[in-house]
Image (cartoon, rainbow, N blue to C red):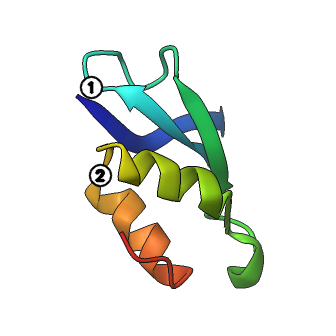
Amino acid sequence: MVKIRLKKFGTKGRPYYRIVVQDVRKPRDGTTIDEIGVYHPIEAEDKQISFNEERAKYWLGVGAQPTAIVKKLFNKKNFTC
């Protein structure tokens, strides 16, 4: 099964995340199938989330399931899952 989830980067106290498509059996920071966006929780509100909507639609169309947090991020950008 394939999920759209967050992959953590950054340093202690200054995290940032990549929105990735990954097999559920892989570890959080393991190899990914596709990277579709980024999430910077410390940035200004309008610069926090950016992702490729076409790739997200493609992966959702072939059966990838977003995690609860990714679903919330998509909803913040008015992108329906």
Among the 4 quarters of the image, the one containing residue 46: bottom right
- The one of 54 and 19 positioned closer to us in this rendering: 54
Residue 40 in sight: no
- Residue at the disc numbered 2: 67
Ranked by sequence position, the earlier of labels 1 and 2 is 1
- Count of numbered circles in the view: 2
Position of 63 compared to 11: left or right?
left
Q: In the figure, is residue 13 to the left or right of 43?
A: left
- Element type at marker 2? loop
Q: Relative to residue 39, is residue 48 depicted above or below? A: below
Badge 1: few (under 14), some or many (20 or more) residues near its Cα, within 10 Å?
few
The x, y position of residue 40, in whole percent, is: 67, 59
Asked if residue 42 is positioned above or below residue 21 in the image, the reply reads below
Disc on res. 69: none
Depth check: give the residue in front, 13 or 58.
Answer: 58
- Amino acid under disc 2: Thr
x%, y% of residue 38? 66, 52
Quadrant for residue 34, please give it: top right
Do the CB atoms of the residues marked 1 and 2 lie less than 8 Å apart?
Answer: no
Quarter of the image with the C terminus in it: bottom left
Name the residue at 41% across, 59% down.
Answer: 70
Q: Residue at x 65, y 50 (%)?
A: 37
Query: Which label was assigned to residue 24?
Result: 1
Q: Residue at x 60, y 50 (%)?
A: 55
Check disc 1 and give the amino acid type: Val
Relative to 56, say whether 15 is above or below.
above
Label 2 crowd bin: few (<14), some (14–19), many (20+), radius 10 Å: few
**Residue 20 makes an appearance in the image:** yes
Q: In the displayed structure, does residue 71 sit left or right of residue 42?
A: left
Q: Quadrant of the N terminus?
A: top left
Q: CA distance from mark 1 to mark 2?
A: 11 Å
Q: With respect to residue 58, does 81 lie above or below?
A: below
